[in-house]
Image: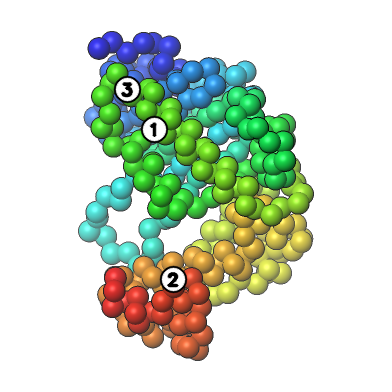
């Protein structure tokens, strides 16, 4: 069955041309001389499109973004760390990166040059903000939702993907649907993901949102990286703000706006996820895990762990 050309995203065509290869049933297999993996894309209609990328290139490829004029009205949802982990022989004590999705307005995503990075495992969904707005019957949305749907300021949110959302992602990745149903099925699944994510964003209690610039976003992500790389050390807002070159108030405000949580709550959540990961590894005792993550009082460790995981560390290590 021949794939209709208008259902194939331009970026896929440009990449195929750049790599001197063909697209077969909307799928571009990376030629071995350039790397490995694949990239596949779908234009469902003029309002919504999706690109699934899971590949490694030997070097980055840059493509001129000829679709710059059309990106102005699109919101983007970028899913990351959602593909199954490939088993490696490397020893690792850190928990694998958690599946998450970046949700942003078009003002964040208007690069003149698209950099096709050498290691990419993402699903990108773009949807027309006006089309999305038309799917809502109530005008009483939260400030977060209103800001997204207006799509007039640069906003970015990150949401951790919970298991029921991951199962929808898995349906998209599995590629188990007959070609004649594929576009219909994947559009429904893409819209389901967007709907579920908007329901999560609706729960955020932000009263006022601040427009972001690239520098602020990069700064907040550096702070996030520092926190997650030092889970044994509780974050000190003043020190983080000083390093970031931001006032403590601004740092706390933007961090909560992007991640939907305070710096300390976010840190504690990941600290407990790391504790759970280390206990599942069965390499350390409960007390060793507690000390490794900076707890000097093990009963306090047990209390915090139970608050996050629903059982104490000893029970968890015996049942997982």
Q: Where is residue 2 drawn, in percent x and y?
A: 28, 10
Q: Which quarter of the rendering shows the C terminus?
A: bottom left
Describe the element under mark 3 as helix, strand or loop.
helix
Q: Where is residue 284 drawn, in percent x and y?
A: 31, 79
Q: Quadrant of residue 260?
A: bottom right
Query: In this rendering, is residue 171 above or below 133?
Result: below
Name the residue at 39% across, 63% down.
95
Mark 3 = which residue? 181
Name the residue at 70% across, 45% down.
142
Mark 2 = which residue? 309
Local packing at callout 3 (Cα closer than 10 Å; few below 14, some 14-19, many 20+) is few
Whether tag 1 and tag 2 are in contact, CB under 8 A, the answer is no
Query: In this rendering, is residue 300 above or below 127?
Result: below
Describe the element under mark 1 as helix, strand or loop.
strand
Local packing at callout 1 (Cα closer than 10 Å; few below 14, some 14-19, many 20+) is many
Q: Which quarter of the rendering shows the N terminus?
A: top left
Of the image marks 1 and 2, the number of the one nearer the N terminus? 1
Name the residue at 62% across, 52% down.
203
Local packing at callout 2 (Cα closer than 10 Å; few below 14, some 14-19, many 20+) is some
Mark 1 = which residue? 52
């Amino acid at each position: 069955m021949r794939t209709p050309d208008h259902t194939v995203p331009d970026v896929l065509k440009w990449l195929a041309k750049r790599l001197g290869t063909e697209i077969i049933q909307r799928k571009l297999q990376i030629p071995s001389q350039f790397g490995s993996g694949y990239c596949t894309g779908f234009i469902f209609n003029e309002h919504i499109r999706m690109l699934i990328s899971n590949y490694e290139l030997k070097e980055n490829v840059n493509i001129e973004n000829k679709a710059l004029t059309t990106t102005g009205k699109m919101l983007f949802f970028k899913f990351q760390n959602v593909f199954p982990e490939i088993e490696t022989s490397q020893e690792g004590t850190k928990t694998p990166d958690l599946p998450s999705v970046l949700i942003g307005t078009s003002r964040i995503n208007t690069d003149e040059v698209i950099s096709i990075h050498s290691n990419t495992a993402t699903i990108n969904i773009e949807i027309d903000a006006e089309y999305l707005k038309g799917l809502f019957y109530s005008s009483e949305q939260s400030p977060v939702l209103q800001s997204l749907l207006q799509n007039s300021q640069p906003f970015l949110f990150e949401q951790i993907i919970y298991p029921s959302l991951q199962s929808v992602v898995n349906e998209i990745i599995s590629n188990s649907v007959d070609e004649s149903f594929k576009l219909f099925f994947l559009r429904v699944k893409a819209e389901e993901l967007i709907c579920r994510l908007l329901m999560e964003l609706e729960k955020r209690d932000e009263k006022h949102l601040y427009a972001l610039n690239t520098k602020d976003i990069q700064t907040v992500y550096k702070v996030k990286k520092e926190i997650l790389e030092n889970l044994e050390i509780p974050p000190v807002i003043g020190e983080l703000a000083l390093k970031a070159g931001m006032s403590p108030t601004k740092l706390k405000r933007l961090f909560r706006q992007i991640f939907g949580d305070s710096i300390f709550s976010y840190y504690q959540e990941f600290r407990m996820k790391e504790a759970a990961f280390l206990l599942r590894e069965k390499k350390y005792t409960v007390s060793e895990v507690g000390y490794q993550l900076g707890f000097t009082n093990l009963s306090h460790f047990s209390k915090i762990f139970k608050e996050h995981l629903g059982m104490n560390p000893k029970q968890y290590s015996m049942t997982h």
